[in-house]
Amino acid sequence: MSRVLHLSGGFIVIAALFAAVAWLSDHPVYRQIPEGSAVMMLTFVHSADRRGECRRLSPEEIAKLPPNMRRVQDCPRGRRPIYVELDVDGRNIYRASLPPTGIAGDGPSRVYQRFVLPARRYDVAVRMRDTARSDGFDHERHEAIEVAPDQLFVIDYRPESGEFIFR
Amino acid sequence: MIGAIRKALRTGFILIEQPFDRLFGPSLNPLAQLGALGFFFFWIVAVSGIYLFIFFDTGIERAYQSVEHLTRDQWFHAGVMRSFHRYASDLMVVMVAVHLLREFSYDRYRGVRWYSWFTGLPIIWLLYASGITGYWLVWDKLAQYVALASSELLDWLPIFGEPIARNFIATGTLTSRFFSLMVFMHVAVPLFLLFIMWVHILRISRPRVNPPRALALLSLAALVAVSIWKPAISQGRAELAVVPSPVGLDWFFLPLYPLANIWSNGTVWALLGAFSLMIALMPWLPPLRRAKAADIDLAHCNGCTRCAEDCPYEAIRMVPRTDGMPFPAQAEVNPSLCVSCGICVGACPSSTPFRRTQDLRTGIDLPEFSLKELRERVVEIAGTLKGSGRVLVLACEHGAAAGRLEGTVVMPCVAMAPPSLIDFILSRDLADGVAVAGCAESACYNRLGIKWTEQRFAGERDPYLRARVPRERIALIWASALAVSRTEAEIAAFATRLVALPPKRLRSPLPVSAGSPPARVHAPAEPGNGP
């Protein structure tokens, strides 16, 4: 009888502990953004122009190269950083010079930035410079958008079409 | 500082363990079975995972649908299994966390125990990797949150050329092959986890990898009850164009994810790095001062293997004989594994205080607290006992009686005392009774000290306590360092009982010189006590 009582008590304690664990497995709920707000995300992966101009090799220079490594042009390996700006309602919320990735600096530049904003209508402008020019921009888009609560609004860039995508 | 934290934690554990001991009994106390319960929950997760895999379909749409089908339509078996899978995983995290804290609080992570502590660290990492990859598979809102937050964390590391989080921000970037990859990860990582769990217990003699059957059945029944009361369910289909908020987080597996949002991914990595480094270095902060390892005296070792069988740390192995004696093997101590607990001394059949050699020697002994010193200490302390109902206490240095000033001989572990020492004390009238006072039953510092002592006294394990020793003159007291008053009360009650007993029939009165053996009286040889 005593053993049965002990086991019953043990079961109650274990079940209570397990119930607490089960409750904590999805409570309390977590809200990563305030109610009524949304996330605007600026993200793209894009390779800027190379750091220098390609130079055409002379026939003598080509002949000096091993047969399997002969090429017409000699291009610098490294790429330029990309300069990007994001304005919301005329106010700049992000600007950065994005260095190329890779040990040799020959990889694409990348950006992944989240901005939590109240859900409403916005005037969004995004600009990017990926060439050797020192002022002005190579790509930009300016548009009024409506952001719904809990929406994930993404600003991406498509290198193949050379334009910013709003979605 | 570390010592103060350890002491506070130990006090907390002892205070919790005492009522648990009363409720469950020491053998079923879950706090004494944390490692075994960790293994138990791993197997529940493994079996339930295999069962769920039968119903799971990989694919962006099909993953969620198949999980919903098994949760809603097949709730009575697959749904329950899903709850088993989820809650047993959470319980494994709880077991690992409490196990880590408890071993820390009892100072069982330094010295030779560094290995198990150190190999516990990859277990934590792999356990979390296993759980987190599992959450991705459901492909509900929580999965979307976990996928995005995990990949943002990984993207912080300069490993990936392109941010992998970009795969989870727009429909069309994710393919069904992703789910095949995640299934592979969710199988491979737990398999590796199991391998490391095996490595974790490699240096432990007789590791407890299965909880007692009654405790396992209680846990299983409780798991069934909780799974029916609160089944694990999905949190709505993942929609990549919508921020998954709010989500019901699993606070056992995902407590750091909100921190990444509040602080930054870099800070979370710094926190994880600092935690891992701290855990890895703790066995040496500061290092444990170790007594010298046990020594073998080949002249008294017949290669009986009892010391090797009883060592809780796998520190003794039997090797071919090297001294030409006609025995096939001899014991060999690995000093890097020996904690000098003395359990081997208590196991050695040569360890008998009745031996008549001038300089008491045994087959295996502790250089810093030899059997000879133990006998001398017993004789010396016994000489201070006065009156009727004289009780000599043989105390473990980690138990409640370790701080007693009178009538007590303290040793590294009560299992260091060979059963013949009890016979020696009683037959030579050194005391009217012997109280063997060790650690709490569910928290033996040297893991097997209490078990071996009880088995030796019960005649179930070599070397046996001889039949002639009056059992009513022996008291076994297992109590934690906090249970001093209970221990004192039990010793006092034992002394009172001794007064009421009829006088002992003395077989071997103490010789005039305490250190030298008696001149005339022979202790009859019995199996188990001879070399």
Image (tube, coloured by chain):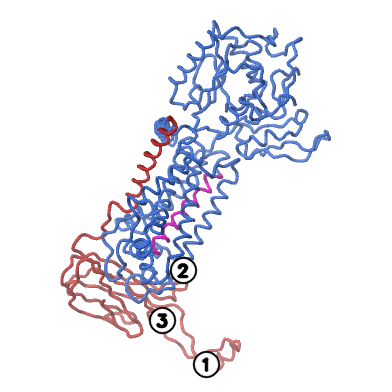
Chain colours: A red, B blue
Question: Of residues A86 and B527, which is closer to you in this image?
Answer: B527
Q: Is residue A165 visible?
A: yes
State whether residue B230 is above or below residue B321: below
User: For residue B181, which numbered disc appears in the image?
Assistant: 2
Q: In this rendering, would B515 be left or right of A139? A: right
Question: Of residues B79 and B394, which is closer to you in this image?
Answer: B79
Tell me the SS state at disc 1. Answer: loop
Residue B373 at what x, y percent from top left? 65, 20
Q: Which residue is mark 1?
A: A58
State whether residue B34 is above or below residue B523: below
Whether residue B145 appears in magenta in the rendering, the answer is no
- The extreme bottom residue here reads A59
Separation of marks 2 and 1 at Cα, in angstroms: 50 Å
State whether residue B125 is above or below residue B458: below
Separation of marks 2 and 3 at Cα, in angstroms: 35 Å
Residues flagged by tags 3 and 1 on a common chain: yes
The chain carrying label 2 is: B
- How packed mark 1 is, by other alpha carbons closer than 10 Å (few <14, some 14-19, many 20 or more), is few
Residue B460 at what x, y percent from top left? 63, 29
Tell me the SS state at disc 2. Answer: helix
Q: Amino acid at mark 1?
A: Ser
The answer to which quarter of the image holds residue B23 is top left
Q: Are marks 3 and 1 in contact (CB under 8 Å)?
A: no
Residues flagged by tags 2 and 1 on a common chain: no
Name the quarter where the N terminus of chain B is drawn. Answer: top left
Q: Residue at x 19, y 79 (%)?
A: A143
The answer to which quarter of the image holds residue B62 is bottom left
Q: Which residue is mark 3?
A: A50
The span picked out in magenta is B115-137
Q: Amino acid at mark 3?
A: Arg
Q: Nearer the viewer, mark 2 or mark 1?
A: 2
